[in-house]
Image (spheres, rainbow, N blue to C red):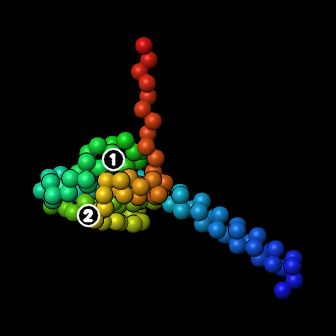
């Protein structure tokens, strides 16, 4: 292969990788955490703390109570269509937070009260 062909190929490859990374970050517009609010969560204290203490701090992520449901992260696109569903049962609180961050969700910055 000629050097210019290799450079062109590498440039094209980098462009594809960059576009894939950008589209992955904007792939999800909002998410819900679906779970019961008691029964099974009482046996999963890390997940319970994540749902009730951490989830409210994220933009475009909310808790949805579903009686008897196992905790799942449900990710939606801009058309409000479900794109991905992930079971949270085996994750720790830190892993759940890392998962939301890796999917492009950010914590809201608390506003300081003006005096």
Quadrant assignment for the N terminus: bottom right
Q: Is residue 48 above or below residue 83?
A: above
Label 1: state its secondary structure: helix
Quadrant assignment for the C terminus: top left
Graded by Cα atoms within 10 Å as few (under 14), some (14 to 19) or many (20 or more), the crowding at tag 2 reads some
Q: Nearer the viewer, residue 15 or 99?
A: 99
Task: Please name the residue shown 64% across and 68% down the image.
Answer: 17
Task: Please name the residue shown 37% across and 41% down the image.
Answer: 57
The answer to whether 5 appears left or right of 101 in the picture is right
Q: Exactly how many numbered labels are in the figure?
A: 2
Tell which circle, 2 or 1, labels the residue nearer the N-terminal end: 1
Percent x, y of residue 56 = 33, 42
Task: Please name the residue shown 29% across and 43% down the image.
Answer: 53
Q: Nearer the viewer, residue 79 or 98?
A: 98
Q: Quadrant of residue 40?
A: bottom left
Percent x, y of residue 89 = 26, 63
Q: Quadrant of residue 95?
A: bottom left
Which residue carries the number 1 mark?
55
The answer to whether residue 24 is visible is yes
Percent x, y of residue 2 = 87, 83
Which residue carries the number 2 mark?
89
Q: Quadrant of residue 73?
A: bottom left
Task: Please name the residue shown 31% across and 53% down the image.
Answer: 93
Q: Is residue 41 above or below residue 20?
A: above
Percent x, y of residue 55 = 33, 47
Label 2: state its secondary structure: loop
Separation of residues labelled 2 and 1 (CA atoms): 16 Å
The answer to whether 13 appears left or right of 26 in the picture is right
**Residue placed furthest toward the bottom:** 1
């Amino acid at each position: 292969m000629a050097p210019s062909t290799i450079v062109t190929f590498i440039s094209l490859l980098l462009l594809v990788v960059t576009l894939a990374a950008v589209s992955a970050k904007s792939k999800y517009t909002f998410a819900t955490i679906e779970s019961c609010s008691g029964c099974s969560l009482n046996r999963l204290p890390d997940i319970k703390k994540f749902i009730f203490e951490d989830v409210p701090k994220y933009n475009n992520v909310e808790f949805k109570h579903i009686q008897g449901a196992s905790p799942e992260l449900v990710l939606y696109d801009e058309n409000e269509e479900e794109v991905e569903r992930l079971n949270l049962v085996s994750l720790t609180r830190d892993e759940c937070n890392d998962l939301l961050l890796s999917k492009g969700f950010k914590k809201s910055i608390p506003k300081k009260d003006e005096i």
